[in-house]
Image (cartoon, grey):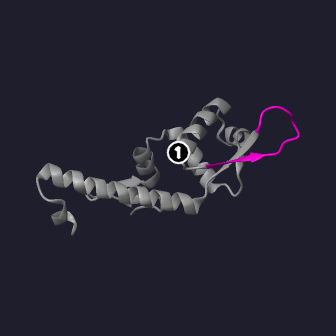
Amino acid sequence: MQGKNEISMPDGRVADIFNVVKFLYGLSDRDIEILKLLIKSQNALTMEEISSKLNITKSVVNKSILNLEKKNMIIKEKIETSKKGRRAYTYKVDTHYLSKKLLVDIHQLMKDLKVKIAYIVGVEVEKTTSI
């Protein structure tokens, strides 16, 4: 029986959806850990809060945050602080946006796969549209 975060593969194997996302976007285990935390969080979190909740250094958090931002999976928002100097930010996930992004990206991947597979096996793309 598959859990709520699992999907069944055509050959019967079961995969965690986050492992699929990790593979599709080239994310690290740490990136996924931070993404999960931000998805579950009710509020946007600072880098310090993420670091504290996951018991990892801010430099490690920063590396993953930059990667997740680059892949448009999280939102960075500037916050006002009483301290002078460096700007402060919070990070969050817009779950509706992320859902749509994943679905659009997977749809595009499927279209690309269909064309590549048709080319490799030597059939016309139009004949594969019913698959």
What's the residue at 63%, 35% (across, down)?
Answer: 62
Q: Main secondary structure of the magenta part?
A: loop
As drawn, the residue found furthest toward the left would be 122
Q: 54 and 120: which one is in front?
A: 120
Q: Residue at horizontal 47%, vertical 62%?
A: 4
Q: Is residue 107 above or below residue 49?
A: below
Residue 111: % across, % down: 30, 58
Residue 81, position in %: x, y?
A: 84, 42
Q: Residue furthest bottom?
A: 130
Picture residue at 14% right of the left edge, 59% below the top: 124
Residue 31 location, quadrant:
top right
76 falls in the magenta region: yes
State left or right for residue 30 relative to residue 55.
left
Where, quadrant-wise, is the C terminus in this rendering?
bottom left
Please tell me whether residue 87 is drawn above or below residue 94 in the rendered image. above
**Kind of residue sitting beneath label 1:** Ile
Which residue in the structure is indicated by mark 1?
32
Q: Mark 1: which secondary structure?
A: helix
Q: Is residue 90 magenta?
A: no
Relative image position of residue 1 (x, y in whole percent): 39, 63
- Left or right of residue 100: residue 82: right
Q: Nearer the viewer, residue 29 or 119?
A: 119
Segment tinted magenta in the rendering = 75-87
How many labels, in total?
A: 1
Outermost residue, right side: 82
Residue in the image at 82% along x and 31% along y: 85
User: Quick one: label 1, few (<14), some, or many (20+) residues within 10 Å?
Assistant: some
**Picture quarter containing residue 127?**
bottom left
43 relative to 87, above or below? below
* Coordinates of residue 113 in the picture (x, y in percent): 27, 53
